[in-house]
Amino acid sequence: MTTDRELSFTSAEHRLVGTLTLPDGPGPHPAALLLPGSGPLNRDGDHRRLRLGIQRDLAAALAAAGVASLRYDRRGVGDSSGRFLHTGFHDNVNDAQAAFAALGADPAVDARALFLVGHSEGALTATALVARGVATAGLVLLAGSGRPGAEVLRWQAARLLPSLPAPVRLLLRLTRTDLVAKVSRNHEKILGTTTDVAWVGGQRLNAKWLREFLRYDPRPDLARAHAPILAVTGGKDLQVDPADLQVVADSAGGPVETRLLPDVTHVLRRQPGPASLRAYRREVRDRVDPSVTGVVIPWITARVAELH
């Protein structure tokens, strides 16, 4: 039997609100801060157009293993104040630092056994946070990249091209459009902006976040991370190169374990057949794949046992 209760905290004068999930039994409990991927996601990891539920599922799996967790609504999402489109990558790191402090200060939590569990952008957030000197018992990096954001997005463009619908691929060929080159040109336009929000390519974008993400290289921060790291990526990830697992292992300042999970996608579900983004809507009807939690949970509980 688990207990959920609201936990709020302040970051840059914004009130951020989340859910503290506590396992059954007396505390204080080891705990994890759950950090989501990019976009206007609520505490469960849901976007209004796609209910990913990644943080919700991770919280349930952790609680079943005796580990508490905190997940929260991003700025301008759910019950949290602020404006999402005006929030930068480093603002998200600041918010995560405030959340981590609030989690560690809760009397139900064992401040000596705090973990960071980040998915996608959340893995980068966790890395940047530890580089600031935040003390953690371990980092779990799920589908986390190991290279600058600009390189990641160019890799995505090249990898996604074969999975686009046939009419779109035909149009790109007929118009002689180099998708990777087009993405690179958009990057130049974004890097030339100075406002938090800007119109680029006919879209209103979170320019501040994109500028900071494009420039962010996690490798120097990984080198400052001396806590144990578990890095997990799916073999069918179309948004982060699975080869970045080795980059993380080579860059980290402390012990690293890596796991490549066959047939698992960027949204941490299993996908049979050719890798495709179009299958996400069907996949997210299921919970996070057991192969993911089956690696993450034993790794965290083993670290907890070492602390005692």
Image (cartoon, rainbow, N blue to C red):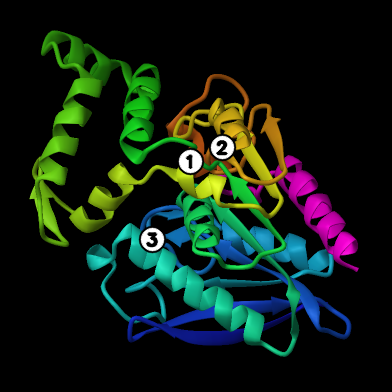
Label of residue 97 in the image: none
Under circle 3, the secondary element is loop
**Residue 55 in the figure: left or right of residue 111:** left
**Label 2 with label 1: CB-CB less than 8 Å:** yes
| Residue occupying the point 69% across, 44% down | 289
Q: Quadrant of the N terminus?
A: bottom right
Instruction: Give the magenta part as a residue range.
Output: 284-308
Would you place residue 181 above or below residue 193 in this image? Answer: above
Q: Which mark is residue 219?
A: 1
In the foreground, 277 or 40:
40
Q: Are marks 3 and 1 in contact (CB under 8 Å)?
A: no
| Among numbered discs 3 and 2, the one appearing first in the sequence | 3
The dot on residue 48 is: 3
Residue 137 locus on image (x, y percent): 72, 62
Q: Where's the C terminus, which quadrant?
A: bottom right
Q: x, y percentage for residue 127? A: 52, 53
* Left or right: 149 as drawn, with respect to 263: left
- Give me the disc on residue 251: 2
Q: Is residue 99 above or below residue 263?
A: below
User: 101 and 240: which one is in front?
Assistant: 101
Which residue is at 50% across, 62% downward?
129
> Where does residue 264 sit, x and y in percent of width and height?
63, 33
